[in-house]
Amino acid sequence: MHDFSFKRGKLYCENVSVASLVKQHGSPLFIYSHATLTRNFQQLDEALAPLDHTVCFAAKANSNLGVLRTLANAGSGFDLVSGGELQRIIAAGGDPAKCIFAGVGKTEEEIELALKKGIYAFNAESEPELIRINKVARRLKKKAPIAVRVNPNVDAKTHAKITTGTYENKFGIAFEEVEEIYERASKLKNLHIRGLQMHIGSQLTEVGPFEKAVKKVVPLAKRLAEKHGIEFFSIGGGLGIVYDPALESGEAKWWRSPKRKNLLTPAKYAAKLIPLLKPLGLKVLIEPGRFIAGNCGILVTRVEYVKQTGVKNFVIVDAAMNDLARPALYDSYHQIVPLAQNPGDHLKKNQISSDVVGPICESGDYFCKNRMLPAVGEGDHLALLSAGAYGFVMASNYNTRAFPAEILVKGNRAEVVRKRQSLKQLWASESVPKWLK
Ligand code: LLP
């Protein structure tokens, strides 16, 4: 459930008309709902209430300060993957003591920063990393809290580019080797062994793979608790969302099409996992990104031209793969709706098979192909739904296109939480060498 809905034929975010925001702030425009963000967080948090747990929002999914502050206020911890994300979380009012630091390539500077800020744990992904964390901690005369990321070798059954929990992937330490690593880590004097972590992939639409991985890893966590006194087990993120509720498009389906009956609700997730985790007696962490932020955001774009070629109806819009890279990168599906609805829009006879494409000079720059959409014309606006996770954060300046603005809506209030980038900013830190005439 989200807070974008049609009222008297006009798309609203909570109580604010999307068209009024576009009129004021231009397009392309990302718009986020405070209510959706908070509700998604609370749903998960409440579902896990029987466990001693912390929900650590994966900041990589959406690291806008307004979004992070919303979640910090709701009581969220954070999963981060860079020194930059840690600084952002602190700037947004997040508590470092509720932060875990993941990623295969932490630099010395990042480790030092995280130690000084007092994060809850590093999720280490290799033995050389543990040695480096120990070294930096010794230099700072500190004990670094660590967990090791176990790779359970369980297939998440999701898109290849976001599967992380098999031995084909670069992530974590093989299940069979983990105990020896803890043994050796326990000899490193500046490490405090605090937990165990795993994450098998993203956009999982069924609970089965989570269950399989947790079942496999719980006995290991138990042994590590007995031997090394670990206090937490992080089961990662990965809860999927429904991108395509209608499942009606003619285009190739993205990954495993989320079927409504398989919709992975917090209740289903909790019902399967709590009985496995509760007897462990450890604190449980989860690291959801997409589940919390995905459907809280939309990307609004303006139709510039409609080009009919005889073969295709191209709807050329002012947003592009540099603003929302997911369709180009993963062939992902985003629902597309006009901001204004007409009564007959749902009828096939009023729809036209369309490719919604951006202005970038690449054939991969499309948002959908051969999708039945109501006919639109120049100056109309479209909203790409479920663009709140891995949307703006993956934007680039390709084709010297400025970053869009971001708006956070709460009730009938709307606030710019990121100004549209000015074109001059794009080359402000560049220069021409003096020796070039
Ligand atoms: N924890 C770790 C260690 C992760 O690597 C990730 C995501 C998460 C948690 C959060 O996963 P989530 O709950 O959001 O599925 N750009 C891709 C997704 C990349 C996910 C990377 N890791 C996309 O747009 O689909």
Image (cartoon, rainbow, N blue to C red):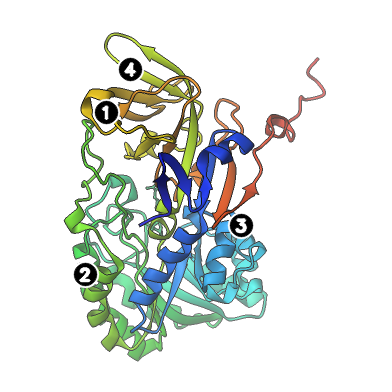
Residue on which disc 3 sits: 65
**Inter-mark Cα distance, 1 to 2:** 37 Å
Labelled pair 1, 2 in contact (Cβ < 8 Å): no
| Residue 366 point in image, percent of width and height | 38, 28
Horizontally, residue 267 falls left or right of residue 117, namely left
Residue on which disc 2 sits: 211
| Residue 423 point in image, percent of width and height | 68, 30
Q: Secondary structure at mark 1?
A: strand
Residue 313: give its label: 4
Residue on which disc 1 sits: 372
- Residue toward you, 283 or 178: 283
Q: Secondary structure at mark 4?
A: strand
Dividing the picture into quadrants, the one containing residue 400 is top right
* Residue at (61% x, 57% y) in the render: 65
| Residue 368 point in image, percent of width and height | 33, 30
Q: Is mark 2 within 8 Å of ligand 1?
A: no
* Residue at (23% x, 43% y) in the render: 246
Horizontally, residue 126 falls left or right of residue 266, namely right
Pair 2/4: label in front = 4
